[in-house]
Image (tube, helix red, strand yellow):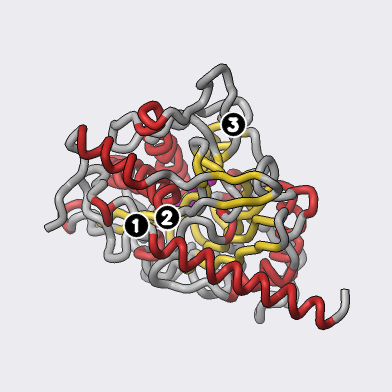
Amino acid sequence: MTRRALAVAAMVLLVSQEAANAQSAKRPRARDIGVTVGILPTGELNAITDVAGVLVGHQTIVRGDNIRTGVTAILPHGGNLFREKVPAAVFVGNGFGKLMGSTQVEELGEIETPILLTSTLSVPRAADFLLTYMLALPGNEDVRSINPIVAETNDGHVLNDGRARSVSQEDVFAALKNAKAGPVDEGCVGAGTGTIAFDFKGGIGTASRKLPKSLGGHTIGVLVQTNFGGVLTINGAPIGRELGRYYLKRELETRSADGSIIIVIATDAPVDARNLKRMAARAMMGLGRTGAAGSNGSGDYAIAFSTRVVGKEGAPKFLTNDEMSPLFLAVIEATEEAIYNSLFKAQTTTGCGHTVEALPLEPTLQILRRMSLLKAKP
């Protein structure tokens, strides 16, 4: 491809990405329209970045009519993670998926790289590019082994040509270098560009909870990449059934419930790897509240970490088992709401000759109003 052609392609990608971001910005988050999940208060942004130090970056890849994919990066802190590892754990709800690096996390109870989310067949490449990024960091000149953490959902069934393995080193580096604190873009961005959930357009979603001081004052944030099936339920309302879009309808005439979800959980609470795994397990309860089917082909994973740096001088003692219950509830509520946000913020998307509709807002609101499940704005 000529330099001019590359420049034109890059401009088309930029325009498409900006248009998608603008369309997502017009759609509300769940809480914006009165969908209040649970009893615990949210953090200031109701996002994983409410956990101090956590950064999130996206690189959205849209090319032609058949590439709808991307990369999302979650950084527990902005330093050199290999030199300042954080406690972490992985919980596997259903193991039909690819979570590179999980066995070392299971063994050592810590992570030493940013967490990348991407498309299934791009996991090996993304991991290789992440290694390149980590090895080049100042202070890592003598490093001979790094455990990259890369997770996926399969966007290659409908909207994206997954076989093209379109994620490049530039895309991975962009997601990492774009990572920032503050509001998190949701919907059809980054690793959520080509995903589908509950037969509607899925994507990236996030939410958080802030415990009262009497329970420790800790913050718990969740980010999800949704790409799975089931019968969508919002605050107990059978939205999927009412809208006529759900798994097994007309003997599987609709799209399969197979798919995946990656749930990333962050907290500033001083929690060790064992109790982080218990927190990660509770994410599956939040997933279940949304009506997920947990089918054979759904890879359902939760990755939890604490921003308390391992071995850092002056770090507080780990929480005891008896102190964990409020954090468990926070994970459940934030996971549920993050999934809703991924749906509410996503927009109708066309790719590979298919169109996947976004969750229709007004019909959904009508059902929630009828069941008295919308909270009036103050």
Residue under numbered circle 2: 345
- Local crowd size for mark 2, using a 10 Å CA cut-off: few (<14), some (14–19), many (≥20): many
Q: Residue visible at 57% across and 17% down? A: 251
Other residues around mark 3 within 10 Å, as few (<14) / some (14–19) / many (≥20): some
Q: Residue at x 42, y 45 (%)?
A: 339
The secondary element bearing badge 2 is classed as: helix
Kind of residue indicated by mark 2: Lys
Q: Position of residue 277 (x, y in %)?
A: 46, 42
Instruction: Indicate which disc, 1 or 2, sits on the residue closer to the N terminus.
Output: 1
Compared across the picture, whether 360 is left or right of 171 comes to: left
> Which residue corresponds to the image point at 62% horizontal and 60% vertical from the top-left?
71
Tag 1 and tag 2, C-beta contact below 8 Å: yes
CB atoms at circles 3 and 2 under 8 Å apart?
no
Type of the residue with mark 3: Arg
Residue 284 in which image quadrant: top left
Task: Determine the image quadrant of residue 39.
Answer: top left
Measured Cα–Cα span from mark 1 to mark 2: 6 Å
Q: Amino acid at mark 1?
A: Pro
| Residue beneath disc 3 | 255
Residue carrying label 1: 28
Tell me the magenta residue range: 261-266
Residue 373 in sight from this viewpoint: yes
**Image quarter (top left, top right, bottom left or bottom right) of the C terminus:** bottom left
Q: Nearer the viewer, residue 208 or 77?
A: 208
Q: Residue furthest left?
A: 378
Tell me, yes or no, whether the highlighted magenta stretch contains residue 190.
no
